[in-house]
Image (cartoon, coloured by chain):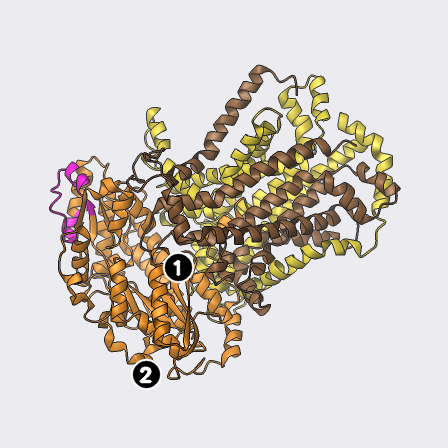
Chain colours: A yellow, B brown, C orange
């Protein structure tokens, strides 16, 4: 494979580079990190400590909290809504992430090709990202309504009306479709940036070798954007786990029929907001979300890195 | 790419048009509603897609209720500042994480990952109290600060730098270039595509943000466009045409910005990045 | 982080951490929780801020001239008016209350003033002679509407009131073979007409787009809470009866299929789209119908909402005074000025709302028909306001409202009996109440 050859030729030079890169003043990296870490610590990590603290109190929005130890977490175990929400958020990750990793990549390949009008298509595909989710959800609920566009099409095909917005499972799936749709342009942009760094010569060489489009996708494109796929996978896992707006807007603020579509972040919103919210309990929920999301992300990154390492070993051989 | 067959081209365009209908349809609906006149029923079922008597009157009325230009200027100030701080902060941090070896690199990287997971909504009050203590509440600076260097942007830049073949930099090392020179002259030009993405994300995030500017600003003269346009959802008078016009005003600059940037950056990045 | 981080923020109402500590700190900063701020009976002077809730669109001139007039009357006072957008108002109030930056005069509804008063940031008007002396100027119902249980007083000057009739779609009535000129007036007639509508339209036309909320239980004559507002009681037999009737309505197809998830706004939109036959509304909806759904407006019928108690539901708005403000005398004077009879009536002439000042509703504007639909609704609503109550208990948090709504849905779906569902809702809500 072309990439392997390149890598082998370059091994010697790369070693020099590695040694060279280590030759910097010990303070340099921290100087470079200062703006980022500063903002991060001041406006994100430090305030988050208050959430961690509140998780162990019975604080309400405007009332000081008393230390209650693990009570909020024990309450969670007996909270029927918590388990429903955990199930829904987990399902969201499992069902949404494969699509948000693959579809935007395919879309990016489609508009990456140098054909007339690609600039227009790129911008157009990005509009769902910038359009307000409120407006978008409104139009989706029109389309999915009992007498909406989708049911009109189904009727023309002879299928009975499907109550997308009246059934808790169909609502959840509709919300997932909305999430995938809204993420298309967003992740496409990330892939486009990565594809811009893939030398076209690789593709052309493979084409000359007679590889078909599928082979080329599997053996050239995927390895080249592999680390980006891992990144997109990690990002979309976390955002799928923390899903809020799409479900909130389609299924309603109370989480669908009888609350069956409630997600974890919706539960945080429901319990912790308002001027009399149960901030302690909501903080405990936030902490649980944080920990699970962290594990999820590390899992995806680890899986991705494992693949990277294997690939690197292969290259060396 | 000269050997693309006619059939493949046709297939690609059919796909593109299908996705196009799916993605811009809702936006066109907003656009259409914003041009509907007051004599027209906007709640018909099935919905009517084209305005019967197109009018720009709704835009004039929006400008009448909300000082659109002042708010747009505030939004622009905030968004441009956010783009600059993000480009600088995310690229320096991303470069350090991807290219330099030092103790604590793993921990620093993990801190950015952790920040990505922190539920931003739960931090608002603590952030507001901090701004008040700094006497920055009710200023545009306070609007910019929390998002000045987005953790996601740092990770995107880290990823981009990590993907640049090392051989490009190594020649410079041999020539005796220092870290800063390698960063500015070699690494940065190689990741123009990702810089464009960071610029777009930063602009978009700052432009769209609602809750934080609402909380931290009290004078309505200092509102950003997104907050100001919320006044269109009046308590006693709902006019979906005005809301739609407001949406178009808020979104159009983003679409235009994206259209301009993508042309310039992606082409440049695709051609100039990896010749080594 | 997310494809639409900014947009998500727009809809998420945040969990607010450590507000309590911040609040405690800000209280230390002022005076440690004694009288707070300046004295209320001092000179009327200083610079005060006045915050309204989403009234800028359409009423900017009204408020600017109001401020000007007040400043002419009291040259030593400067009033800074600011208006907040509709969304996240509670979050904005929460942040300001925590940071000690609450405006001097704030537009609140009782469910917002209750937690603020409990946290000690609002002035108890009944306990402050300078403010209490104005009590007689407002109707007893309105003053009572702003009085908070367990907190021993009213915490806001009564401002505008809203109430409304039941709207129905004559065309849908006609299509189902019902007499469009004879709308239902009692619950029996309402449920009867609904059954007829769905039967004759073959299930195509639903009557209502929403499930019963706490106000509906109140109007039906269900006792919602005990005397001291410490326990919910809407699971009493009458409550179960109402829910059982709704269950039958749902089974017969009288509720829109999306009723279990619709917000009041979405229910209203279903009515605008002419998908449901009836919807409760306010006098101010007429302009909305005429403007946005002219074809509905031509077929609009108006009737009184059924009621078993003789007391219609109303929503009350008030102006609260910041207890820790620096110029309380000026703040009280201004809050009273905005809510005095002359200014309330002037405001209610511009918007289809109702003044809460004594005697106002005897004015011909609210008693004599002028031949227009607006006039008809206005007169009917004004008449019904005598004796109207705000049924929604102020201690019922949004979370408790969600609990009720979701348990009601379980009953309608047949997953629980109406009795079980209401018992569970009451048990969960009581647990939240006790944890305060």
Give, as a single range, the part of the protein colored magenta.
C168-191
Q: Secondary structure at mark 2?
A: helix
Q: Secondary structure at mark 1?
A: helix
Residue C74 location in percent, x, y? 37, 77
- The chain holding disc 1 is C
Whether residue C305 can be seen here: no
**Dot 1, crowdedness within 10 Å: few (<14), some or many (≥20)?**
many
Residue B20, above or below A85: above
Q: Pick whichever, C17 or C105, lies toward us.
A: C105
Residue B72, above or below B133: above
**Dot 2, crowdedness within 10 Å: few (<14), some or many (≥20)?**
few
Closest to the camera, between mark 2 and mark 1, is 2
Q: What separation in Å lies between label 2 and label 1 (alpha carbons)? A: 36 Å
- The chain holding disc 2 is C
Residue B50 location in percent, x, y? 36, 33
Q: Which residue is mark 2?
A: C129
Q: Which mark is residue C399?
A: 1
């Amino acid at each position: 494979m072309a990439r392997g050859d390149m890598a082998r030729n370059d091994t010697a030079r790369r070693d020099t580079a590695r040694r060279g890169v280590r030759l910097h003043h010990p303070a340099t990296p921290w100087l470079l990190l200062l703006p980022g870490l500063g903002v991060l610590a001041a406006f994100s990590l430090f305030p988050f400590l208050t959430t961690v603290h509140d998780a162990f109190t019975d604080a309400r929005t405007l009332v000081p909290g008393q230390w209650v130890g693990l009570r909020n977490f024990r309450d969670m175990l007996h909270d029927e809504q918590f388990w429903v929400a955990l199930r829904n958020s987990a399902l969201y990750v499992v069902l949404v992430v494969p699509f948000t990793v693959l579809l935007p990549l395919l879309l990016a390949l489609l508009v990456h090709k140098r054909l007339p009008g690609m600039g227009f298509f790129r911008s157009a595909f990005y509009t769902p990202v910038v359009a307000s989710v409120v407006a978008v959800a409104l139009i989706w609920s029109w389309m999915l309504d009992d007498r909406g566009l989708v049911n009109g099409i189904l009727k023309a095909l002879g299928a009975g009306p499907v109550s997308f917005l009246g059934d808790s499972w169909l609502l959840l799936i509709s919300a997932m479709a909305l999430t995938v749709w809204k993420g298309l342009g967003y992740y496409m942009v990330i892939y486009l940036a990565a594809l811009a760094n893939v030398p076209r010569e690789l593709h052309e060489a493979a084409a000359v070798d007679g590889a078909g489009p599928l082979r080329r996708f599997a053996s050239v494109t995927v390895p080249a954007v592999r680390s980006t796929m891992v990144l997109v996978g990690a990002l979309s896992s976390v955002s799928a786990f923390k899903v809020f707006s799409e479900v909130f807007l389609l299924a309603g603020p109370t989480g669908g029929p009888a609350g069956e579509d409630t997600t974890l972040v919706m539960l945080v919103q429901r319990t912790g907001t308002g001027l009399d919210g149960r901030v302690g309990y909501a903080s405990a929920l936030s902490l649980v979300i944080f920990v699970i999301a962290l594990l999820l992300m590390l899992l995806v990154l680890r899986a991705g890195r494992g693949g990277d390492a294997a690939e690197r070993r292969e290259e060396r051989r | 790419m000269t050997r693309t067959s006619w059939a493949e081209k046709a297939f690609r365009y059919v796909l593109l048009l299908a996705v196009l209908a799916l993605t811009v349809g809702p936006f066109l609906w907003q656009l259409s509603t914003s041009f509907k006149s007051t004599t027209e029923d906007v709640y018909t079922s099935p919905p009517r897609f084209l305005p019967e008597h197109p009018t720009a009157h709704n835009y004039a009325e929006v400008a009448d209720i909300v000082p659109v230009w002042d708010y747009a200027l505030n939004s622009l100030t905030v968004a441009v500042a956010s783009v600059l701080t993000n480009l600088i902060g995310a690229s320096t941090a991303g470069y350090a994480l991807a290219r330099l070896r030092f103790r604590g690199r793993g921990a620093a990287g993990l801190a950015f990952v952790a920040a990505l997971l922190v539920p931003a909504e739960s931090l608002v009050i603590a952030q507001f109290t901090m701004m008040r203590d700094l006497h920055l509440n009710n200023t545009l600076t306070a609007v910019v600060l929390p998002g000045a260097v987005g953790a996601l942007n740092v990770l995107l830049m880290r990823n981009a730098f990590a993907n640049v073949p090392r051989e490009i930099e190594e020649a410079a090392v041999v020539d005796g270039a220092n870290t800063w020179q390698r960063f500015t002259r070699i690494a940065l030009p190689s990741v123009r595509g990702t810089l464009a993405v960071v610029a777009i994300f930063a602009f978009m995030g700052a432009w769209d943000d609602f809750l934080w500017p609402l909380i931290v600003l009290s004078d309505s003269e200092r509102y950003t466009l997104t907050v100001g346009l919320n006044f269109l959802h009046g308590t006693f008078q709902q006019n979906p045409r005005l809301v739609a016009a407001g949406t178009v005003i808020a979104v159009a600059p983003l679409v235009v910005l994206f259209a301009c940037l993508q042309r310039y950056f992606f082409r440049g990045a695709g051609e100039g990045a990896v010749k080594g | 982080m997310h494809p639409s981080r900014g947009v998500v923020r727009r809809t998420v109402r945040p969990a607010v951490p450590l507000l309590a500590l911040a609040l405690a700190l800000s209280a230390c900063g002022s005076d440690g929780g004694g009288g707070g701020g300046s004295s209320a009976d001092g000179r009327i002077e200083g610079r005060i801020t006045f915050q309204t809730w989403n009234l800028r669109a359409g009423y900017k001139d009204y408020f600017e001239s109001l401020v000007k007039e007040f400043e002419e009357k009291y040259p030593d006072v400067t009033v800074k008016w600011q208006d907040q957008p509709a969304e996240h108002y509670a979050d904005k109030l929460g942040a300001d209350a925590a940071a000690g930056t609450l405006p001097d005069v704030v537009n609140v509804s009782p469910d917002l003033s209750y937690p603020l008063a409990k946290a000690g940031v609002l002035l108890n008007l009944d306990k402050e002679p300078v403010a209490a002396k104005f009590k007689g100027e407002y109707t007893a119902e309105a003053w009572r509407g702003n009085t908070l249980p367990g907190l021993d007083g009213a915490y806001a000057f009564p401002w505008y009131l809203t109430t409304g009739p039941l709207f129905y779609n004559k065309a849908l009535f006609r299509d189902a073979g019902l007499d469009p000129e004879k709308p239902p007036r009692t619950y029996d007639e309402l449920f009867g007409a609904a059954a007829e509508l769905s039967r004759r339209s073959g299930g195509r036309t639903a009557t209502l787009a929403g499930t019963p909320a706490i106000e509906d239980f109140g109007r039906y004559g269900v006792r919602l809470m005990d005397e001291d507002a410490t326990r919910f009681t809407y699971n009493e037999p009458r409550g179960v009866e109402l829910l059982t009737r709704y269950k039958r309505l749902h089974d017969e197809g009288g509720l829109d299929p999306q009723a279990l998830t619709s917000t009041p706004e979405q229910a209203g939109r279903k009515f605008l789209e002419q998908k449901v036959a009836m919807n409760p509304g306010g006098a101010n909806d007429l302009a909305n119908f005429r403007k946005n759904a002219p074809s509905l407006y031509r077929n609009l019928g108006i009737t009184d909402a059924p009621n078993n108690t003789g007391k219609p539901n109303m929503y009350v708005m008030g102006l609260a005074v910041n207890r820790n403000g620096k110029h309380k005398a000026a703040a009280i004077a201004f809050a009273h000025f905005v809510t005095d009879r002359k200014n309330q009536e002037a405001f209610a002439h511009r918007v289809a709302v109702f003044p809460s000042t004594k005697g106002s509703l005897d004015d011909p504007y609210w008693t004599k028909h002028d031949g227009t639909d607006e006039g008809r609704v206005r007169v009917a609503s004004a008449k019904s306001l005598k004796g109207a109550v705000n049924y929604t208990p102020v201690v019922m948090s949004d979370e408790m409202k969600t609990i009720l709504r979701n348990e009601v849905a379980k009953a309608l779906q047949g997953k629980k009996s109406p009795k079980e569902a209401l018992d569970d809702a009451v048990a969960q809500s009581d647990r939240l109440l006790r944890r305060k």
